[in-house]
Image (spheres, rainbow, N blue to C red):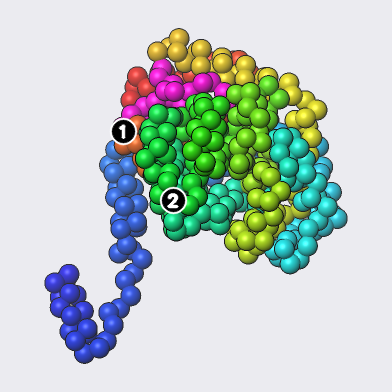
Amino acid sequence: MSLIAGTLNRVRAKVGRPPAAKPFSALSQHRSIKQHEMLGTMLGIRNPFFRSAEGPEGRMTLIDGKPCLNFAWCDYLSLSQHPELTAAAKAAIDRYGTCVSASRMVAGDTPLHRQLEQELAGFIGVDAALVFVSGHAANVSTIGTLMGKGDLIVHDEFVHNSAVVGMRLSGAEARSFRHNNLDALEAILREERMNYSNVLVVIEGLYSTEGDIPDLARVVEIKERYGAWLMVDDAHGCGVLGPTGRGIAEHCGVDARKVDIWMGTLSKAYAACGGYIAGNRELIEILRYAAPGFVFSVGLPPAQTAAALAALRVLKREPDRVERLHKNGALFLEEARARGLDTGRSIGIGMLPIMVGATTRAAKMVTRMYERGINTSLIIYPGVPMNAGRLRFFLRADSTAEEIRTAVQVAKEELQRC
């Protein structure tokens, strides 16, 4: 059939008729999905993605009718059901409705948006902030707006997909360095800096697949010496790192103003939705008028804005939530190591991986964990390198020691089975 189709297409081309549009099922992306589904069926592995989460109940969640201990949500500070957040979200709906219905640039801000941005900037320790309706869009739009042809972006190999997409759209040259290898970062800048107009270094605060952090003080020193900007994606670090949850700068004892661009999300520790960019006033002014993901996108819904603002205020009032989260992470790390489990590079704060290896083994393991009432997330290629599959556990401030020990013990048993 493919030979006949090819012949027909050549005949059409000769007579000036274009070929028929391909069905989407012919695209490589769709074929790959079906191949993975077939492999899973052959191995008796249930699809671990898009399970129906019917609602959280504290540290538990109901998935396809089955109650599970929930280690798959990034509710680090246990705020998603906090009464102050739910009350603030309901009040915002009553006052402003469900949606601002247009770009904030043309439709106008609400007082909630401005309060949230002011308080985020003050909490981080910089001049100003700008809230986007999506954390992914915040990264894509910021990098795409600031960088262009003739510029260079140097990034850790494990930065988030949103940063990578932003780099591609920017038109700038991009070079990666091995994870947290700052000698390699410096070598690239030493060789290439003089060949480009603007240079941006992109790293994360708390790496979402590794659970480790960079030496921020040294990165700042390097970027200053070579005249580069530094962007830190602190999506998993904000509200999590540092004694009071101010992020990687507080954790490392670095002045936040020494980082040119801060990125964070509202959907993890702040239990809402959206993302933000923070820095000096000139940066934020540029983005307010030029970042496509802000200018040409609807503003953050009032309920989510109010919930994030309430979460930030609870965090400032109750920093002990961060302390409890850190203690739970340390316990998980201790229990895992005592059982001989590989937690990779994780420092034991917020997110902790258990390394499994082959994709099929990791998929089997996450299915068996679910069958035993523990919900965790599966991270496999291309999210991590080939044969570096892992289960990712997001800790909460209100997780109990018994729940953590149970999760680790079940992981040990199922890893042996797999």
Check disc 1 and report the residue beneath it.
387
Q: Is residue 220 magenta?
A: no
Q: Is residue 35 above or below residue 159?
A: below
Q: In which image quadrant can residue 190 be found?
A: top left
Determine the secondary structure under disc 2. loop
- 1 or 2: tag closer to the N-terminus: 2
Which segment is the magenta one?
341-362
Quarter of the rendering occupied by the C terminus: top left
Q: Residues within 10 Å of mark 1 (few under 14, many from 20)?
A: some
Mark carried by residue 258: none
The residue shown at (83%, 52%) is 111
Q: Nearer the viewer, residue 73 or 223?
A: 223
Q: Position of residue 35 (x, y in %)?
A: 29, 50
Q: Position of residue 25 (x, y in %)?
A: 33, 63
Check the image and report above or below for 76 versus 334: below
x 71%, y 48%: residue: 281
Residue 263 in the image: state x and y as whole percent.
Answer: 60, 42
| Residue 207 is at least partly visible in this image | no
Tag 2 residue: 196
Q: Nearer the viewer, residue 282 or 164?
A: 282
Q: Could you say which is closer to the camera, residue 208 or residue 46?
A: 208
How crowded pointer 2 is (Cα within 10 Å; few <14, some 14-19, many 20+) is rated as some
Extreme-front residue of the structure? 194
Name the residue: 55% across, 43% down.
229
In percent of the image, x 86 and y 55: which residue is there? 95
Is residue 128 visible in this depiction of the protein? yes
Answer above or below: position of 225 versus 172. above
